[in-house]
Image (cartoon, rainbow, N blue to C red):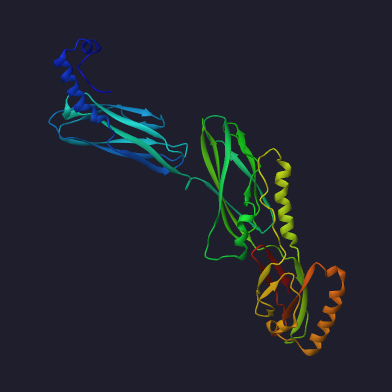
Amino acid sequence: GLNTPFTPRDMLEFNQRDMLLFVMNLYMNLPAFIPKTTVKFKGHLHQEITKTIELKNPSKYVIDYDVHLYGSDEFKVKESRVRMEPQTTSYFAVSIVPHFKKPIHSRLTFLSQRFGSLSASMVFNLETDVSYEGTAKVIPLETTLYEPLNYELEVENTFHANAQFNVRYYQERLKGEETYPEEESSHLFPEAFWSATDMVNVKKGDKGKLLVQFLPFVRGDYRCLFVFSDEKVGEFAVQFQGKALATAPFEKAFVQTESNTPMLKEVVFPLKNAALERGLSFFAERFKQFKSRDKKSTISGMQEEGQKYAVLYGSPFWAGPKELQQGEKEKKDKKDETPKAAPEAEAQEDRKASARAKDKKHKDAMVFPLMFNPKGPGLYPAKLVFASGYDVRVLEVE
């Protein structure tokens, strides 16, 4: 790209003087081919990004530049030649519509048509800095803990050719202001989002299908970015925003009493969380269906026994212990945690508890004392949330 008046034949016949002049010419002009700066094209995938380069001609002569792009052909210029009048400034535009998130590089060279240091050539590096934000389709999903939600995603090929999209996905659980006890076991549970497919073939202008599963084990908000990429065609992304709510109630308990009369109700609290076990069985199905994949279950050595549950009452009309310890026998000295019922009702409930303890069907469960304290006639619905560092359960009462 260096402009020089010498021909290859001249160089072969150089004497010492000519060679010295030629080397001086290289010394004065080659530094101009060192890129002056890197122009960053920051923007979004599939959206046009345009940058303008300022050119100045401080000399008294007209300078002509030939414009050349070396590297990726995704960068575009409208002019291949620029004329600079003496002591003027002009602006040269370069644009690109990126089809890939990874950085795209090119080199923009302005080759001077005047020989001499006053009209040196100029070189600029071009580089993209592209994000999916603003271009990725956002799909909200919501389900309860341990309950899989399957979503059939339409994969549309809007590119100019048939595509074989490789599927990658990146997910995270978003940290919010509210924290949950089961977060401490997050590393033991599988990732919430999952897909069995890692490649989708879609013809030009057609649509394909991708099944995505959302199976959360910890409450909160999730985000997952699915990237569909064909190195010869392009790529695009789809973002899922998942929300995990508390699990469905394991039981619904009913209490009926006279107005303004407290009532003590004992609820059977199973040692095993059936909803959690069902969720883990859905997770295990992933590996039964795809044995060829080099994946292993992360659920190993997880124990439910001995968990301590914090109890949250969803209504001021319902009360009971603030904590529940699995495997711990009921103790009478904890009565101060539960409002006292009428002596007759308490005695009756004691007899019921004794009979229940002898019943074999309760050998895998605990008895949870619950006090209902109405303030007038009517219905008093509530949801009690039992949360440990391992799992969550919900009891619905009315």
Circle count: 0
Instruction: Find residue 104 and report its horizontal and vertical position in percent.
Output: 42, 35
Left-right relation of 182 to 274: left
Instruction: Find residue 176 and report its horizontal and vertical position in percent.
Output: 53, 62
The one of 99 and 33 positioned closer to us in this rendering: 33
Instruction: Find residue 72 and report its horizontal and vertical position in percent.
Output: 41, 30
Left-right relation of 146 to 46: right
Q: Is residue 254 visible?
A: no
Residue at the outermost bottom position: 343
Q: Is residue 277 above or below residue 51?
A: below
Residue depicted at 78% across the width and 77% down the height: 266
Residue at the outermost left position: 60
The quadrant of the image that shows the C terminus is bottom right
Say which quarter of the image contains residue 98.
Answer: top left
Residue depicted at 69% across the width and 53% down the height: 300
Residue depicted at 64% across the width and 64% down the height: 389
The one of 322 and 147 positioned closer to us in this rendering: 322
Say which quarter of the image contains residue 228.
Answer: top right
Q: Is residue 39 visible?
A: yes
The one of 397 and 155 positioned closer to us in this rendering: 397
Q: Is residue 308 above or below residue 265?
A: above
Q: Is residue 264 above or below residue 310?
A: below
Instruction: Find residue 66 and report its horizontal and vertical position in percent.
Output: 27, 25
The quadrant of the image that shows the N terminus is top left
Say which quarter of the image contains residue 52.
Answer: top left
Residue depicted at 67% across the width and 70% down the height: 309
